[in-house]
């Protein structure tokens, strides 16, 4: 029996299925029509595809050739490219020790076979909802979009440190208007695809949007200093064209109030 053919790319969330049994892979494919699926036949291929594609979620069997599901979990959690991805382990190993092993190695959910499709779909939905809350937290922290108040989710240390590393790299090069996505990728040792997938998964921003958000938020702070002109702030924050800076600043902040509810007159009178 052949493995299912992955559907054409779309905006649907991407799930990587790591399963060496074609019948089980076909059944999982039939259970998850609302998602875009990729397939791997063992843990090694699963790890290679996960770090290349950066899926939104991974479902893996435990007993597989070359690399089992426990080892796959451990490798995924220890690799910065994939450490944020939710993992569901599906296995016939129902004993308590096996379940503890899976959770210790980094699985978010451990489901025993045979499983109920409804439970699998619910578990997946809840994991992806938690990931979305994390995005909302970062969006709020950058203050670039109007968002409803959300309860701040617990951030895993590796995820927080990754975003912080990206942020610090941008801040070090803040005044350099030539600083590019390619330079950022080289600095953090990720391909452009890997950076885009991981950063969007964690923050909701593309790399370009993330860089611009850092620049604009720094500009918002500097513009409150009466000694600094709008042009000087634009150059200090990596904008080579003050007129362009003025346009994107107005688009992003649109006369929103800050600093105790008082608008910064210089921003919208001079800019």
Image (cartoon, rainbow, N blue to C red):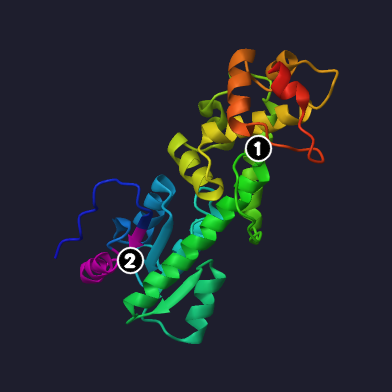
* Helix, strand or loop status at disc 1: helix
Residue 212 shown left or right of residue 43 in the figure = right
Q: Circle 2 — which element?
A: loop
Location of mark 2 (residue) = 65
Quarter of the image where the C terminus is located: top right
Estimate the x, y position of residue 61 in percent, counting from the top left: 36, 70
Highlighted range, magenta: 16-32
Q: Residue at (59%, 42%) from the top-left corner?
A: 145
Asked if residue 145 shows in the view, the reply is: yes
Residue 226 picture quarter? top right
Does the CB distance between marks 2 and 1 fall below 8 Å? no
The answer to if 102 sits in the magenta stretch is no
Q: Nearer the viewer, residue 245 or 11?
A: 245
Q: Nearer the viewer, mark 2 or mark 1?
A: 1
The residue at the point 82 percent across, 41 percent down is: 260
Point out the residue furthest to the bottom here: 95
8 shown above or below 239: below
Residue drawn at 50 percent across, 73 percent down: 102
Horizontal and vertical percent for residue 252?
60, 32
Residue 177 shows in the view: no
- Mark number, residue 167: 1
In this picture, is 96 found above or below 232?
below
Name the residue located 48 percent from the left edge and 39 percent from the top edge. 196
* Percent x, y of residue 37: 30, 56
- Viewer-proximal residue among 78 and 161: 161
């Amino acid at each position: 029996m052949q493995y299912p053919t992955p559907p054409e790319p779309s905006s649907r969330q991407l799930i990587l299925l790591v399963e060496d049994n074609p019948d089980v892979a076909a059944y999982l494919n039939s259970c998850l029509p609302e998602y875009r699926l990729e397939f791997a036949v063992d843990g090694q291929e699963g790890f290679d595809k996960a770090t290349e594609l950066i899926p939104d979620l991974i479902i893996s069997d435990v007993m597989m050739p070359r690399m089992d599901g426990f080892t796959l979990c451990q490798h995924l959690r220890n690799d910065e490219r994939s450490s944020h991805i939710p993992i569901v382990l599906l296995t016939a190993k129902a004993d308590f020790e096996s379940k503890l092993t899976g959770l210790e190695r980094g699985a978010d959910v451990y489901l025993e076979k045979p499983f109920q499709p409804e439970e699998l779909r619910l578990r997946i939905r809840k994991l992806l909802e938690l990931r979305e809350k994390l995005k909302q937290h970062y969006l709020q922290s950058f203050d670039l979009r109007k968002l409803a108040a959300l309860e701040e989710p617990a951030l895993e240390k590796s995820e927080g440190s990754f975003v912080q590393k990206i942020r610090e790299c941008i801040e070090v090069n803040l005044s350099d208007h030539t600083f590019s996505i390619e330079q950022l990728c080289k600095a953090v040792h990720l391909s452009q695809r890997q950076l885009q997938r991981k950063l969007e998964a964690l923050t909701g921003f593309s790399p370009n949007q993330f860089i611009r958000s850092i620049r604009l938020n720094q500009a918002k702070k500097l513009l409150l200093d009466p000694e600094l002109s709008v042009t000087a702030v634009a150059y200090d924050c990596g904008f080579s064209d003050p007129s362009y800076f003025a346009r994107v600043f107005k688009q992003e902040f649109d006369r929103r109030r800050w600093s105790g509810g008082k608008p910064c007159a210089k921003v919208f009178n001079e800019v």
